[in-house]
């Protein structure tokens, strides 16, 4: 029997290098990502001009490096699955960016030869240095990759520094453009934004800095994080001088450079400084869109935003991940005024409309990106024993006041900027309309004026049309008048709907604050559980059993709260960055049902059918928050209906049927029901009880303290659900219920 085996032609490397990677800029990004995956904190990229006119590109990092064994196993193996099997880096727990095992062949795209120099620490504690040269010109089509040898040298020493250096020779500058370098910076922005992350089970990540230099080119970037801070709408910085005076500076789009002093001194904070980028989710409001694209901004703020605190150069957790400056708290409460009278004076001097409401222009906590630096020797900032935050101290309160004053001051200029933008847009639109129509109008009545103008113009045109065709044109005129009425009616309705949505948005923010506070209480609950368990171990068997029962009850309560709080992550201020995906319908119905466990038990409501739903039925793509909004609204309506009915046996039933064109979700209940005449009325905004029997029944059968769980009915729930489904190509409708049920609603999911 003949044994056959594959060989690999060198042409494959060309496919993986030059052809798969379209530009040198993409190739460079891929190599820098390898340094990130190797837990490097710094990578330096240098372009050095050689005497022959070509360039050498040096990419040096201080990561963990590779041993000779690792080079043979991973670097020398094409399409290795190492990064697929090990998705987190070993030291800092970073999510690895590579997966296909072909990134190193980007070196071929950048030059003709490569020298790999890497140093790693062995288990013995010694440092092993390996140098390998790769002559890419030898890997020509027609040669077998496995037969070409690469010369390498290995040495071991007791001292050294880990890291990897790639020296690529034979590069040209023809393809390297300013636009290309901006692409590189944008792609590396997310990596460099990683400063001071802490992942469970790993060491604190000090961050990833990138430095790019080129002979004769002004492309040096020592820390891309600094460029990120300077690229947003504005940069607010502050410091406390030697006299304790707080000095603040702001550089912002259309506002320019501003400087002010705080309204009180902070002698205990001498030497402290902060620098924060103000980055809204609006591309037109970025000072340097070459660094921050809209996509990068959304991803960046979702993962790395917040104002951190750094002591001795190291981040102090959890500051930056929490709302330590109470920004979200004040936003959720719609706090309109600042505590400082001095800030009100500044707002009035800027002639801001309603200066007493300038605080409403504050951006979300996720739109602030930066850090506070505490100098060596600062007193009053003693870390807790578990290294999570500082011990309570007046200095902490002073720090919050110092930084928050700067944020509040910059918010006044946000209000000023927003006012300028609104005014400019309104004036531009008004001017264009005036030029076209020749009519002056009050800006507050521009919609009505524009509609009247259109109607008048159509009437004028009708008079110019020959009499034999005028009859047909009268139909057009009638349609215009109908459209006029519809638009005015829609505008009035939209204003009312906007008012309701503002209330909903405010409630969502309050829920997030509630979630944050309850999480703190859960931590205390866990501590109490541990103490009781410890005490129980020293009691007699009978008393011990009682105490262990209490411990078990506390654990059940903690688990229940944790599951409910797990849903609050969906109510974020940055939902634009959420991703559409395929979702398991059974899992999400189960989680939605758990939200009502308390009321389900209290009113003995039987919810059936969930266990019969197949695990493998996926719906979507859609946002997870959209699916939960749909399920929670349907469940809430059914629960209210069965309680309002006063029935002894309250039942709700789920059915999910996988069909060729999608998935059908059916929800049935034995509540008060809905008359067929009102099947469509139920979806009209603000119509919450078309049959006029739901809320009268709830008044009789629902405990007052439970109204907060189910709500009083805004009349928007089913409207929101229908809008979501319409956007995703689905639909929702009431059906005549089958025998044994009072209501049946069917949802067609994509």
Image (cartoon, rainbow, N blue to C red):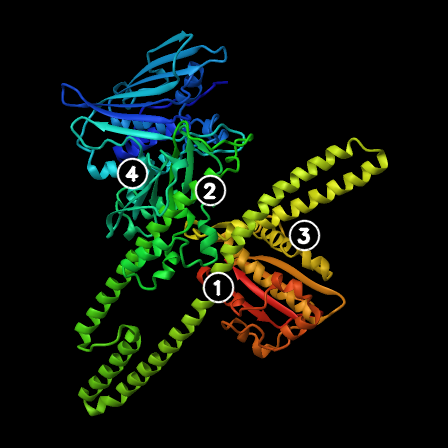
**Closer to us: mark 4 or mark 2?**
2
Of callouts 1 and 4, which one flags the residue occurring earlier in the amino acid sequence? Answer: 4
Q: Residue at the location (62% across, 44% down)? A: 522
Tell me the SS state at disc 3. loop
Assess disc 4: are there few (<14), some (14-19) or many (≥20) residues with their C-alpha within 10 Å of its C-alpha: some
**Closer to us: mark 1 or mark 2?**
2
Q: Which mark is residue 227?
A: 4
Q: Which residue occupies the extreme left position in the image?
A: 52
Q: Which residue is mark 3?
A: 611
Of callouts 3 and 2, which one flags the residue occurring earlier in the amino acid sequence? Answer: 2
* Residue 210 visible to an observer of this rendering: yes
Of callouts 4 and 3, which one flags the residue occurring earlier in the amino acid sequence? Answer: 4
- Distance Cα–Cα, label 4 vs label 3: 53 Å
**Closer to us: mark 3 or mark 2?**
2
Q: Which residue is mark 2?
A: 397
Between 480 and 135, the residue placed more toward the observer is 480
Q: Residue at the location (34% across, 79% down)? A: 483
Assess disc 3: are there few (<14), some (14-19) or many (≥20) residues with their C-alpha within 10 Å of its C-alpha: few
Assess disc 1: are there few (<14), some (14-19) or many (≥20) residues with their C-alpha within 10 Å of its C-alpha: few
Q: Which residue is mark 1?
A: 503
Between 648 and 748, the residue placed more toward the observer is 648
């Amino acid at each position: 029997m003949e044994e056959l085996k594959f060989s690999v032609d060198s042409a494959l490397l060309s496919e993986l290098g030059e052809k798969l990677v379209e530009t040198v800029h993409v190739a460079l990004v891929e190599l820098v990502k390898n340094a990130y995956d190797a837990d490097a904190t710094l990578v330096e990229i240098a372009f050095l001009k050689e005497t022959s006119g070509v360039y050498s590109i040096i990419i040096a990092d201080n990561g963990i490096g590779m041993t000779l064994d690792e080079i043979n196993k991973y670097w020398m193996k094409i399409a290795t699955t190492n990064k697929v099997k090990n998705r987190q880096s070993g030291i800092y727990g970073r999510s690895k960016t590579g997966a296909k095992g072909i990134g190193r062949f980007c070196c071929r795209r950048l030059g003709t030869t490569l020298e790999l120099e890497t140093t790693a620490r062995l288990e013995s504690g010694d440092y092993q240095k390996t140098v390998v040269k790769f002559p890419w010109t030898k890997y020509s089509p027609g040669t077998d990759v496995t037969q070409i040898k690469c010369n390498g040298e290995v040495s071991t020493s007791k001292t050294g520094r880990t890291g990897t250096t790639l020296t690529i020779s034979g590069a040209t500058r023809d393809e390297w453009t300013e636009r290309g370098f901006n692409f590189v910076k944008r792609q590396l922005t997310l990596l460099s934004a990683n400063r001071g992350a802490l992942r469970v089970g790993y060491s604190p990540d000090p961050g990833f800095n990138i430095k790019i230099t080129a002979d004769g080119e002004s492309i040096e970037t020592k820390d891309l994080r600094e460029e990120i801070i300077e690229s947003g709408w504005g940069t607010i910085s502050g410091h406390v001088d030697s006299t304790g005076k707080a000095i603040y500076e702001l550089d912002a789009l259309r506002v320019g450079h501003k400087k002010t002093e705080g309204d009180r001194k902070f002698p205990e904070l001498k030497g402290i400084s902060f620098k924060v980028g103000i980055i809204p989710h609006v591309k037109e409001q970025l000072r340097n869109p070459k660094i921050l694209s809209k996509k990068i901004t959304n991803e960046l703020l979702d993962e790395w935003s917040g104002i951190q605190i750094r002591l001795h150069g190291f981040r102090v957790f959890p500051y930056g991940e929490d709302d330590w400056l109470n920004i979200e708290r004040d936003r959720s409460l719609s706090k309109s005024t600042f505590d400082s009278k001095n800030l009100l004076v500044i707002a009035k001097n800027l002639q801001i409309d309603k200066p007493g409401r300038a605080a409403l222009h504050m951006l979300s906590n996720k739109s602030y990106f930066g850090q506070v630096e505490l100098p060596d020797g600062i007193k009053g900032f003693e870390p807790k024993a578990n290294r999570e935050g500082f011990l309570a101290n007046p200095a902490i309160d002073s720090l919050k006041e110092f930084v928050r004053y700067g944020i509040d001051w910059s918010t006044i200029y946000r209000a000023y900027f927003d006012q300028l933008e609104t005014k400019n847009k309104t004036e531009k639109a008004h001017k264009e309309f005036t030029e076209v129509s020749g009519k002056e109008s009050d800006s507050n009545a521009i919609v009505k004026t524009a509609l009247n103008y259109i109607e008048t113009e159509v009437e004028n045109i009708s008079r110019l049309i020959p009499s034999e065709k005028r009859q047909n044109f009268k139909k057009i005129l009638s349609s215009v008048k109908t459209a006029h009425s519809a638009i005015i009616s829609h505008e009035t309705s939209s204003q009312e709907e906007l008012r309701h949505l503002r209330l909903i948005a405010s409630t969502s923010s309050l829920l997030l604050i509630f979630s944050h506070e309850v999480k703190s209480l859960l931590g205390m609950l866990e501590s109490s559980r541990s103490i009781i368990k410890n005490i129980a171990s020293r009691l007699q068997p009978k008393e011990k059993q009682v105490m262990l029962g209490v411990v078990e009850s506390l654990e059940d309560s903690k688990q229940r709260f944790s599951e409910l709080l797990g849903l609050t992550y969906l109510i974020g201020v940055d939902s634009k960055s959420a991703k559409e995906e395929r979702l398991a319908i059974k899992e999400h119905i189960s989680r939605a049902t758990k939200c009502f466990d308390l009321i389900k038990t209290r009113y003995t409501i039987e919810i059936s059918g969930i266990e019969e739903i197949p695990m493998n039925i996926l719906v979507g793509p859609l946002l997870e928050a959209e699916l939960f909004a749909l399920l929670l609204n349907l469940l809430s309506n059914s629960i209210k209906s069965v309680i309002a009915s006063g029935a002894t046996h309250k039942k709700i039933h789920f059915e999910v049927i996988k069909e060729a064109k999608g998935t059908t979700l059916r929800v049935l209940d034995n509540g008060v029901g809905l008359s067929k005449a009102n099947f469509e009325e139920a979806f009209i905004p603000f119509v919450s009880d078309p049959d006029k029997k739901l809320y009268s029944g709830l008044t009789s059968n629902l405990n007052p303290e439970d109204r907060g769980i189910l709500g009083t009915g805004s009349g928007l729930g089913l409207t929101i659900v229908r809008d979501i489904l319409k956007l995703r190509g689905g639909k929702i409708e009431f059906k005549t219920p089958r025998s044994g049920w009072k209501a049946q609603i069917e949802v067609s999911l994509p």
